Image (spheres, coloured by chain):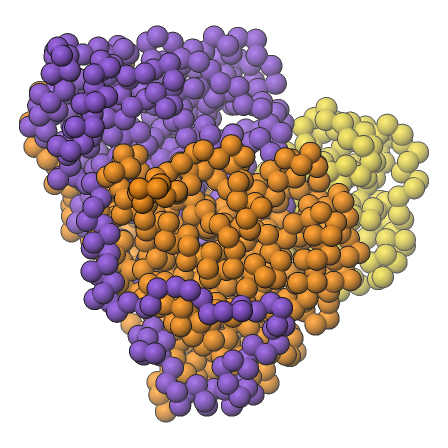
Amino acid sequence: MHEPLGASGLILNERLLWEKGRKGRSGFSMPESDVPSSPLPPDLVGDGPDFPDLSEVDVVRHYTRLSTWNFGVDTGLYPLGSCTMKYNPKTNERQAGLSGFSNSHPLLPESLCQGALRLMADLERFLAEITGMDAVSLQPAAGAHGELAGMLVIHAWFKQKGDSRSKIIIPDTAHGTNPASAALCGYSPVPVSSSAEGILSPEAIAAVMDEETAGIMVTNPNTLGLFENHLKAISEIVHAKGGLVYADGANMNAVMGIADMGRIGVDVLHLNLHKTFSTPHGGGGPGAGPVCVKKHLEPFLPVPRIIQKDTGQYALSEDFPESIGKLLTFHGHFGVLVRAYSYILSMGAEGLKKASQLAVLNANYLKEQLKDTFHLAYDRPCMHECVFSDRYQQAYNVTTLDIAKRLMDYGYHPPTIYFPLVVHGALMMEPTETESKEDLDQYIDALKKIAEEAKETPDVLRAAPTRCKVRRLDETAAARKPCLAG
Amino acid sequence: MKDINELKFPENVRYTRDHEWARLEGNIVIAGISDYAQDQLGDVVYVELPRIQDRFENGEVFGTVESVKAVSELFMPIAGEIVAINAELSDMPDVVNSDPYGAGWMIHIKPSDPAFMETLMTREAYLDMLKG
Amino acid sequence: MITMRYLPHTPEQIQQMLTVAGADSLESLFSGIPEECRRLQEMNLPEALSEWALNRHMDALSAGLAVSPEYKIFIGAGRYDHHIPATVSSLKSRSEFLTAYTPYQPEISQGTLQAIYEYQTLAARLMGVDVVTASHYDGATALSESLLMAIRKTRRKRVVLSSLIHPYYRRVAQTYLEPAGFEIIELPFLENGLTDLSLLEGAVDIAAVALQSPNFFGCIEDLKAGGQKAHEIGALFIVGFTEALAYGLLKSPGSQGADIVFGEGQSLGIPIAFGGPGLGMLGCTPEHTRNLPGRLVGKAKDMDGKNGFVLTLATREQHIRREKATSNICSNNSHCALTAAMYMASLGKSGFCDLAILNHDKAAYLCRGLSGAGFKMPFQGTFFNEFVVEFPEELETLYQRLLEKKIVAGLPLSAFYPELSHHYLLCVTETASREDMDALIREVTPCMNP
């Protein structure tokens, strides 16, 4: 019998930065000045920021210790539904760190940055190919930013036709950024419920689609981990009334090489490079959210766009009068783009398709192994993620939250909890393709033990976690009297 | 969250569909959220109130009440002008949980039409609504 | 197909798992997907590269890019070349920071949470405000968010921006504000390279007045005056920056009356990386805290009374408020904020101030040298590490030849300010040596006397 994954060991406490240090210490190698001093007029000069003075060792010990309190994909399984916490390849870091990529200025004359422009042009092409769309902008800095870009493109398309629509259909399973992004463009959300099957029905869309409605924002596969099988028919209904179809591509990891979003009828879509394309989450970002469109929406993409001249040279062009404009100061999160580009080149078409197949295999394996232990929200084949709930455990007064907290003691990051909202007490698991069968089996084992504990010793779950740096925190007090700086 | 039978619904106030309560005192209407509402929300962490002299129609949003995991809009039970707000709530939002009908009051309204109070739900009607 | 090192499944295991899943083959897992939704052909992508072939490919691609020290590049304009200590590069790459998710489960994310709380604190001290968010995408989106904050707070629909805020920042603000029907009014600039505040007199229905200091020309604005005028008309005063290092030397925006401060933190240990990712910094005085968009880390105590940190005030955010959220932001630039904190910690107050002084001294040296060679400095005001030079028309041709000599002699301004033809924005940081600057002066001097 293997030892459980979650152990405990010596981790160290570490004070706050300004509780350390001594005036006069330095952690920086100050260059010598080779120029005369040029003092500023005293009325402009400030006292400088009140930072602590720390030695290099102070800084290294500080952050090394802090890092031991964290849990990354490199530590263990991170089955967060709709986040696609797949392995972040180290070679991608090596590429992003190359001097040419990490030190080049975005405003260099064209002739001096061809390598970067070519990388971006190639990546645009790859993403268009993978999604089945026609044109791409790599400018948006995150998924939500890509959604905003998509909404603005839709808004601009209607404006150009002199058509002012004020609503957009958003399913009840949508990620919160969907209605938030729509609202930024002045669209009111028209909610629509999924059917008992867990997907959208053409009838439900037909009932609400009209000439006041700009279209629909749909996630495919959706946040229940199910493929929207009726999406082609839905697209036709939306298009018939002059609307457009926006697809949230956050769950693209399930269908690379298999589904064709363009063929389905999607007009505009965004991708999350920090999900499907393996770029690291960094504790909350930076990500990248490229927006992909069909030909008729291409003129509206953000500028600048990458063009190739007759000479073969790449350039940045703003010569797109119908563009929605700029969404970011420069061209996009280039450092993130380099990593995604490296990943696609490392996987190739076969590799990406295999990744999707194995992601879906892993999720279905989890689903089958756990469906007798936890209530399965939709007992049918899933895509890359599956949704359970705490229904069986409610008998012992144990909630999804308790299960999630106890999983940490077992050495796992919890799955996504309480989302999507349509499943009460949702526990959404996305293993991704980079998890092996052994690791999944150990995870399944842990969950079964937790379900036993829920029955026999529920107090243990309610007190969890007990092996982490801290126990459950009083979030109410933190919100009542926020202390946001030291 | 509690069972409806465990919650309090005083006789001397009226109730709205949006789970507010309102009480006419002289020519002022005092309003807050019901015991059911505070129980659903959980620990209240913040209440956003309007400014004195703000005017709202019946049913208009006059503020928000937040817990750690949720936010709810607050809707006017009756049209009128705000003449007082409960300043205690900024320091002690938890009083909305512990004493929703008393110290947890939120606003005083000078109603445009005091007679409108008669159209609000009685305790019985509100209980009927909650029991569905 | 060669075994891919990121895909651990063996053929036997795939079979075992398919059996459990009740499927005959990997393809059959997708049998529920209608034919009309499927690809008709396999994806047309380059053949997968081995790690070694990828290295060769990327080495070749990056080799052509012009970078310091081989090239002497005198451009800032929103992205600055500063030395990044090896400690910062090393510490930020720790995979516990890099491969972790957003700290929604605080008990196993205390590393990220404390680090970001520390970032918020140091950033607040730098900007002279009380609260700073856990990051935005860049300075331009931080500006846009601060304008939306002011619009929400004042319920007014018009904002005033200085035309000396970075041109790209203003364009991004336009993209954010226009669809919602908000109006942007621009303040022109004066001959001295500062913003003309006179239009503010008697202006009505203004939610916010925004200035950048140092401004796009590098000049330091009169923030006290700007703040007074803004408050007189009931508007919020918003101040921003593109070069965070400036506040190692100059008075902080918060200390000069700003209600909201936005800026770009790339100078704080984040590589230039062809323009991204950057670090959007956003902070405010206490009364606007709950109106802030984006994530915030706050102190908390656990069940045993131990100190810790959590994401807090989350009810403003999209995952709870959805269409009523203060912003649609979900992912932010957390890792960049972490990097910035590491950089600020490494420099300390002493180092930060000394480095800022060094930047200014270097830029002042170049400015004096060019001035001495006879070139015109159109804006006489004090600058930090960027300034504008007016070169004669002859420089245009010379500029191209200088590229071949691996010198990029500043950023031509005519694309941004058509009336400023032959004006160039030059930036000097601690990375430029006296020799580099002397060489530049030498190379451009011939066009003074053609």
Residue A117 seen in the figure: yes
In the image, what residue occupies the spot 38% across and 26% down? C166
Instruction: Look at chain A in the picture and name its colour.
Output: orange
Between A467 and C174, the residue placed more toward the observer is C174
| Residue A409 appears left or right of C320 | left
Q: Quadrant of residue A281?
A: bottom left
> Farthest front residue?
A310
In the image, what residue occupies the spot 86% across and 27% down? B112
Q: x%, y% of residue A465?
A: 44, 69
Q: Quadrant of residue A433?
A: bottom left
In the depicted structure, whether residue C11 falls above or below residue B100: below
Between C343 and C59, the residue placed more toward the observer is C59
Between C217 and C357, the residue placed more toward the observer is C217
In the image, what residue occupies the spot 63% across and 53% down? A245
In the depicted structure, whether residue B118 falls above or below residue A341: above
Rendered yellow, the chain in question is: B
Q: Quadrant of residue A88?
A: bottom left
Quadrant housing the C terminus of chain C: top left
Quadrant housing the N terminus of chain C: bottom left
Between C232 and A74, the residue placed more toward the observer is A74
| Residue A186 appears left or right of C147 | right
| Residue A54 appears left or right of A313 | left
Count of numbered circles in the view: 0
Residue C300 seen in the figure: no
In the image, what residue occupies the spot 57% across and 12% down? C203
Q: x%, y% of residue A464?
A: 47, 70
Rendered purple, the chain in question is: C
